[in-house]
Image (cartoon, helix red, strand yellow):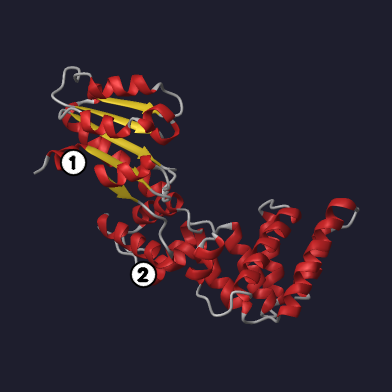
């Protein structure tokens, strides 16, 4: 093994837009080290708060009452002095020090990024797409000796949204109740995301299911969701439908990449977009805008106005 390879094994970069997976990996690395060498062998620094020289000294100083030490530096890219010396820091890191460079946000155009990419053990955690998220849920259930089908994993995401931390916590709750996760148990034990409910509400309204649309609206109001907030979520859904409508034959994944919007809600928006004309969509957006203005500037009963809006979709 070359000297550079030896250094790379001791110095790990953790980065990526997937905050859940990134934090989980950091916890895993730290926990494994502390279990073997103890808490006293671990030092943590924040690149935005701590002095560069203090970080460098910690890396070079001998471990205290342990054979090895670990230094975790969060956001070193935000520390100008630290970032400018990164090559020297890497080359001079002693063999008994494990250096973890934790970079939730990093400019890929910088020299700092390029050095980490080529001279450290580089682990990147991107956001999962809809399919990847479903597979991840099913795999996590399996790790806990449970079972979650791919279809029910999809259903769980539709119900809760794409926040990975929330999905993981709800998955553990479901597994505690029954290792064989069913759609019935998902309905029983989880609370649907308000955005998901609003999508169901619009779906019912567009399908002419007026009673169901009003029932779903009533459920939101019963949960103390204010009319202005419901209108805001409707506008958000209309924006997704417009994105899907005017993106032609592009897939939800392609639209997501172009618009920096989560892929999963675009899948449903794509389906709804195919059921309404551009003229109707513009009308709905204009009417929603008018309701928003009246709700903020007049004494209109926004509750009743929203119900009328929904049953005339």
Q: Nearer the viewer, residue 150 or 214?
A: 150
Q: Is residue 39 left or right of 221 when viewed as pictured?
A: left
Contact? badges 2 and 1 (CB < 8 Å): no
Q: Considering only vertical position in the picture, is 207 above or below 138? A: below
Q: Give the total number of marks visible in the rendering.
A: 2
Of labels 2 and 1, the one closer to you: 1
Place of residue 150 in the rendered image (x, y in percent of width and height, measured from the top left): 36, 70
> Which of the marked residues, 2 or 1, is nearer the chain's N terminus?
1
- Residue 309 shows up from this direction: yes
Q: Considering only vertical position in the picture, is 229 above or below 38? A: below
Q: Which of 258 and 239 is in front in this view?
A: 258
- Quadrant position of residue 242: bottom right
Q: Is residue 36 left or right of 224 when viewed as pictured?
A: left
Place of residue 147 in the rendered image (x, y in percent of width and height, measured from the top left): 30, 64
Quadrant location, the C terminus: bottom right
Local packing at callout 1 (Cα closer than 10 Å; few below 14, some 14-19, many 20+) is some
Q: Residue sitting at 13 percent across and 24 percent down?
A: 67
Q: Considering only vertical position in the picture, is 77 above or below 155? A: above
- Residue 24 shows up from this direction: no
Q: Residue sitting at 79 percent across and 69 percent down?
A: 309
- Quadrant position of residue 5: top left
Place of residue 134 in the rendered image (x, y in percent of width and height, measured from the top left): 38, 64
Distance, label 2 to label 1, CA atoms, is 36 Å
- What kind of element bears circle 1? helix
Q: Which residue lies furthest to the left in this view?
A: 1
Q: Is residue 269 left or right of 130 when viewed as pictured?
A: right
| Residue designated by label 1 | 9
Local packing at callout 2 (Cα closer than 10 Å; few below 14, some 14-19, many 20+) is some
Residue 150 — which label? Answer: 2
- What kind of element bears circle 2? helix
Q: Residue sitting at 42 percent across and 56 percent down?
A: 127
């Amino acid at each position: 093994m070359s000297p550079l390879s030896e250094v790379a094994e001791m110095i790990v970069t953790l980065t990526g837009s997937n905050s859940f997976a990134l934090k989980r990996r950091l916890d895993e690395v730290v926990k494994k080290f502390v279990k073997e060498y103890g808490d006293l062998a671990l030092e943590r620094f924040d690149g935005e708060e701590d002095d560069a020289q203090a970080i460098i000294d910690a890396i070079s100083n001998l471990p205290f009452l342990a054979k090895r030490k670990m230094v975790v530096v969060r956001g070193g890219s935000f520390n100008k002095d630290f970032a400018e010396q990164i090559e020297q820091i890497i080359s001079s890191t002693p063999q008994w020090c494990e250096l973890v460079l934790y970079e939730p946000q990093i400019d890929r155009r910088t020299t700092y990024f390029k050095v980490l990419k080529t001279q450290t053990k580089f682990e990147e955690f991107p956001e999962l797409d809809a399919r990847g998220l479903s597979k991840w849920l099913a795999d996590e259930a399996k790790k806990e000796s449970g079972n979650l089908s791919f279809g029910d994993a999809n259903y769980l995401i539709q119900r809760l949204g794409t926040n990975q931390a929330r999905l993981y916590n709800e998955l553990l709750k479901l597994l505690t109740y029954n290792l064989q996760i069913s759609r019935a148990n998902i309905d029983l034990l989880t609370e649907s995301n308000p955005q998901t409910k609003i999508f169901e509400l619009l779906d019912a309204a567009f399908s002419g299911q007026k009673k169901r649309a009003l029932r779903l609206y009533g459920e939101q109001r019963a949960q103390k969701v204010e009319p202005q907030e419901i209108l805001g979520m409707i506008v958000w859904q209309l924006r997704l439908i417009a994105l899907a409508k005017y993106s032609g034959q592009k897939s939800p994944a392609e639209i997501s990449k172009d618009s920096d919007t989560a892929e999963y809600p675009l899948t449903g928006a794509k389906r709804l977009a195919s059921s309404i004309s551009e003229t109707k969509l513009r009308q709905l957006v204009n009417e929603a805008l008018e309701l928003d203005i009246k709700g903020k500037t007049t004494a209109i009963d926004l509750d009743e106005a929203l119900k009328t809006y929904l049953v005339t979709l």
